[in-house]
Image: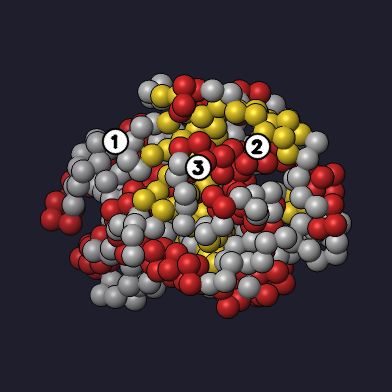
Amino acid sequence: MDKVKVLFTTSEAVPYAKTGGLADVSGALPRFLQEAGAEVKTILPFYRQVKETKKKFKPVEGGRLIKYTLGPGNLEFSLLTDGKTPETIFVKNDKLYDRPELYRDSATGKDWADNDDRYITYSIAALLACKETGFKPDIIHANDWQAALSLAFARTVFKDDPFFAEAHTVFTIHNVAYQGHFPKETFYKLGTSPHLFYPASPFEFWGKVNFMKIGISYADIVNTVSERYAVEIQSDPEFGHGLEGVLRERNADLFGIVNGIDYDDWNPEKDTLIPQRYGPKTLENKKKNKAALLKKSGLAGINDPLVGMISRLVDQKGLDLFAEIADDLLSLKVKMVVLGTGDARYHELFKELEKKYPKKIKAFLTFDNKLAHGIEAGADLFLMPSRYEPCGLNQLYSLKYGTVPVVRETGGLADTVEPADETGERGTGFVFTHYDSAEFLETIKKGLALYGNKAAWKKLQLQGMAQDFSWHSSAVKYLDLYRKALAKEPVEAV
Ligand code: ADP
């Protein structure tokens, strides 16, 4: 087969714009797909964050203003490129994308009211960018709700356009809790036949519009970012967030591929963002990172176990469970460093804990990539008590950095962390099953007990560091997924 041509649509990607794991995946996967034999173009909105990287971008086709009429809307944008291989093309419309945050207005804490318009324009622009550059995709691979319409538009608005006639569609769910719900009026902006809004049609979800449902419906193949999560999201509303029925209908076409991590960025042997590099053979050097992290945090006690946490501070990540055990945990002989931003009540929680236990905990309530590396390198244990976790990246970084993860047995955490036994001979971390604070605390205590046994602890660290979650094997699995999509009759165009 010729090189499969992949249009990769996503709303964030490192090194340009990031709010979470989707950006890590979208920054790395296209490179590894390309290495594995695909030809990939990524399309991103030209956000303020992208501008602020101060990287060089060149206009596509002289930067001409592209105009497109979609239903009642007159869309306008121009295109820029980073000129790299694989290439990223940016959709520039400052009115829509030049804002302080990607998805929400931090002044109100609410999503941007015109997020439907922002991602409708983005999705149309992604397809038009292909035409503009003569890149005829075999696969349109959309990620999460923001990019979902790129699949539907290829089969509706462009259904008579031979340019996309051969394109097959793949939709990856990175987190089913974020679906892009909009009022019925949004449907009329999509430029499709008005008859398509009927109960249980791809465009209708309880009388409203749900972009993720549209993506799932127009994908030849659907996947999510771990095998366990692929099963969970079909099981009940707690995991499926209302889409469990829609997902069950796609059961035969629904797969799980665990995310890889980019060992060029996250590898303690090469990491330029940490004070002291180390690896399995020089594990004693990890302590220098611990000392530096304690110093930065204004804490002391190099021999006490140092517990780390890096997280969006939201319920999904198990923050309510953490709140229940915080006093008990901080009464033990431990130190703790937290990095995160999110819900105001969790900011308050950490501020209070800092006041109450100034010698035990430091919380950095900000977004700081360098510090994230510093915590992975400096901490002894890492907490991820998630309520649900599509894949999770920090536990994978933790394994590589010899920072033993304590995780709840859900989604990608269940697939990637193997429970340790009491001797440290087997396993890579500490795992608890129920979403229960007592179980969480007991599991941390097991970890702390093993930390007291230096030889056993070192074995456990080395077992974690020996795990291989590189993108190479996951990229090959994505190529298989594309083959499956190409072999299918395309989901019927309407
Ligand atoms: P999610 O995408 O649900 O937030 P993941 O574990 O998949 O969770 O990915 C989170 C990514 O964002 C990781 O790369 C993590 O290091 C990073 N991250 C989260 N919060 C912060 C923060 N406050 N500062 C720096 N990096 C952060």
Element on which disc 2 rests = helix
Q: Which of the marked residues, 1 or 2, is nearer the chain's N terminus?
A: 2
Name the residue type under label 3.
Cys
Residue located at (41% from left, 63% from top): 478
- Nearer mark to the viewer, of 3 and 2: 3
Q: State the mark number for residue 121.
A: 2
Mark 2 residue type = Thr
Q: Is residue 381 left or right of residue 278?
A: right
The answer to whether mark 2 is within 8 Å of ligand 1 is: no
The residue where tag 3 is placed is 130
In percent of the image, x 38 and y 39: which residue is there? 87
Placement of 39 over or under 113, stated as above or below: below
Name the residue type under label 1.
Leu
Residue 196 as seen in the image, left or right of residue 380: right
Q: CA distance from mark 1 to mark 2?
A: 37 Å
Q: Mark number for residue 273?
A: 1
User: Residue shown at 21%/39% (left/top)?
Assistant: 276
Q: Where is residue 453 shown, x and y percent of the image?
A: 26, 65
Q: Is residue 26 visible?
A: yes
In x, y percent, where is residue 135? Answer: 45, 45
Task: State whether label 1 is within 8 Å of ligand 1.
Answer: no
The mark tally for this picture is: 3
In the rendered view of the protein, which quadrant contains the N terminus? bottom left
Q: Are marks 3 and 1 in contact (CB under 8 Å)?
A: no
Q: Which mark's residue is nearer the viewer, 1 or 2?
A: 2
Looking at the image, residue 206 lies above or below residue 85 = below
Pointer 3 or 2: first along the chain? 2
Look at the picture and state if 50 lies above or below 317.
Answer: above
SS assignment at label 1: loop
Where is the C terminus found, in terms of image quarters? bottom right
The image position of residue 397, as x and y in percent, is 35, 53
